[in-house]
Image (cartoon, grey):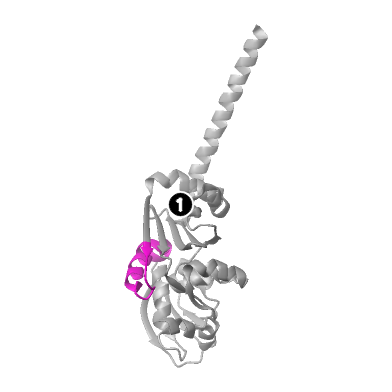
Amino acid sequence: MKNVKAVKILNLKLFLGVVLLLFLVILILVGFLKKRDKNENLDYKLGIIAPDGIALVSISNERKMINVLNLGSEVDVWIPNGMSWYKNTKIKNILEQEKKTDLAKDIFWYNFGFLTDKILFLNSVNDWEIDSILVNNLGFLNWFKYRINYDKMLLKREKIDGSLGENEIFLSEIMVRDFSESKLNNEELRLSIFNNTSEGGLANFMTKRLEWAGFSVVSTDNNEEKIDKCLIVYGDKVDLNYGWKMMNKIFNCDKKYDQTLNENELELYFGDSLASMIKYSSYLNKN
């Protein structure tokens, strides 16, 4: 009897020890995630491509929002680099058949100014909500934070029907409000855009995408200086901004420091080589 009682006590102690250990692990995880919130102000952005359409998903701990933008089945999107306009429900098949899935990030950027952290090729456009898919793509820690914050966050779904051109005002509203990068919205970086090509409207086109992403564009203009692909001219402290990191993630440009520019001031010049590379003329043919 004493042995049985001793075994029961030992089992109880082991059980309580495991519970205590799990509790401590959870506390450590929560503390770590809170620290990351303070240091990184995380938004997580997913671009979804499936046979039934395309969707944009933004999980923003800053805004306490989960925003989803779906495209109606008849909405055309532009594939840059010479592949023109296609129904969004055909994009997955086209990219996979042509072995050009690497263009997926450009589709989200050049159509919506949406800076994706991950592109998900799924069987259905709403499959991103499945926990196993989120764990695989966000990583366990980001998924865990998503789950513990889920009940405190507002889930908001939007849908576009018709052409992207017809929805440009709507896009200008919701992209900045719901899908832009929180860190960019909070920065003092001031950006000027210059079109150094013969393609009319390129500066305004790029300006919209950069503003939708969260950049503050203070001016746009044409410029006759010969630029090959693109050039970034920057003033003091620009390279300390989060926007500097994002700018270099979007565009692989030459860079030049200019001490005459103001602090946190940046100029972006686009040349013929970039316009030719993305086949901007094929975008104009639709619009």
Quarter residue 253 falls in = bottom right
- Above-or-below relation of 30 to 173: above
- Above-or-below relation of 21 to 229: above
The question of residue 165 being in magenta is answered with yes
Quarter residue 189 falls in = bottom left
Question: Label 1: which residue?
Answer: 37
**What stretch of residues is rendered in magenta?**
159-185
Nearer-the-camera pick, 213 or 192: 213
Query: Residue 170: horizontal and vertical position, in percent?
Result: 33, 69
From this viewpoint, is residue 201 visible? Answer: yes
In which quadrant will I find the C terminus? bottom left
- Residue under the image location 40 percent in, 77 percent down: 207
- Residue under the image location 36 percent in, 69 percent down: 171
Query: Residue 114: horizontal and vertical position, in percent?
Result: 45, 67
From this viewpoint, is residue 244 visible? Answer: no
- Above-or-below relation of 243 to 26: below
Crowd class of label 1 (few under 14; some 14 to 19; many from 20; radius 10 Å): some
Answer left or right for 157 relative to 17. Answer: left
